[in-house]
Image: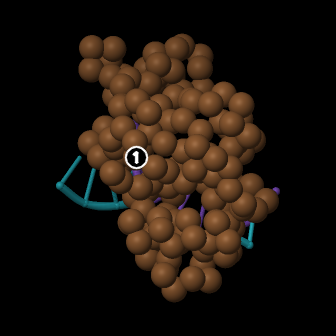
Chain colours: A brown, B purple, C cyan
Amino acid sequence: MKYWLMKSEPTDFSIDDLEKSKTIDWYGIRNYQARNFMRDDMSLGDQAFFYHSNCKTPGIVGIMEVCKLAYPDKFQFVKNHKYFDPKSNPKNPRWLNVNVKFVKKTKLLGLKDIRTYNELKNMKILQRGNRLSITPVTAEEWNFINQLLND
DNA sequence: GCCAACGTTGGC
DNA sequence: GCCAACGTTGGC
């Protein structure tokens, strides 16, 4: 089993939205590296931190679980949709998504807080200029953060 | 709203 | 294949 951190802008889709809908297709990923993580490295049961980005207090706000393996993102073929991609061929779809399900809300562990722990200093999210919306988390980082969230 | 960092596009 | 221009991300 692997661990992940997945970003979403809360004005777009928040942890509360996930709690309400229980599961969601994680659509709209239009970055090859992030797509490849979903396609090649995610398994059923993988755990992920839900991270609120581009908001007043960015940080980890909850936990979710991969509940469906990667399959074509339906919005890439919906004309006029925000995520429509005219270059994607239905016979060989360019963009994929997994489904995730709500596990729990946690207290907010802000980006500012994450920065203060030496144990977390290698997290991708802290690296300069990192914009990748899906990043792997090591077991050590996962356990360390979980402990913080349970305190 | 600003802007640095980064990914993608397209002309050559 | 290079690289300038452009668009996007996301913290601040």
Q: Is residue A68 left or right of residue A56?
A: left
Of B4 and A44, the residue lying toward us? A44
Residue at the spot 49% in from the left edge and 51% down from the top edge: A48
State the image coordinates of residue A133 (x, y, percent, origin top left): 50, 51
State the image coordinates of residue A115 (x, y, percent, origin top left): 60, 78
Q: Is residue A30 left or right of residue A11?
A: left
Residue at the spot 33% in from the left edge and 51% down from the top edge: A1
Q: Amino acid at mark 1?
A: Asp
Residue identified by numbered label 1: A46
State the image coordinates of residue A14 (x, y, percent, origin top left): 70, 42
Q: Quadrant of the C terminus of chain A?
A: bottom right
State the image coordinates of residue A149 (x, y, percent, origin top left): 64, 66
Tag 1, which secondary structure?
Answer: loop
Above or below A72: residue B8: below
Of A63 and A8, the residue lying toward us? A63
Of A63 and A111, the residue lying toward us? A63
Residue at the spot 72% in from the left edge and 60% down from the top edge: A107
Above or below A94: residue A114: below
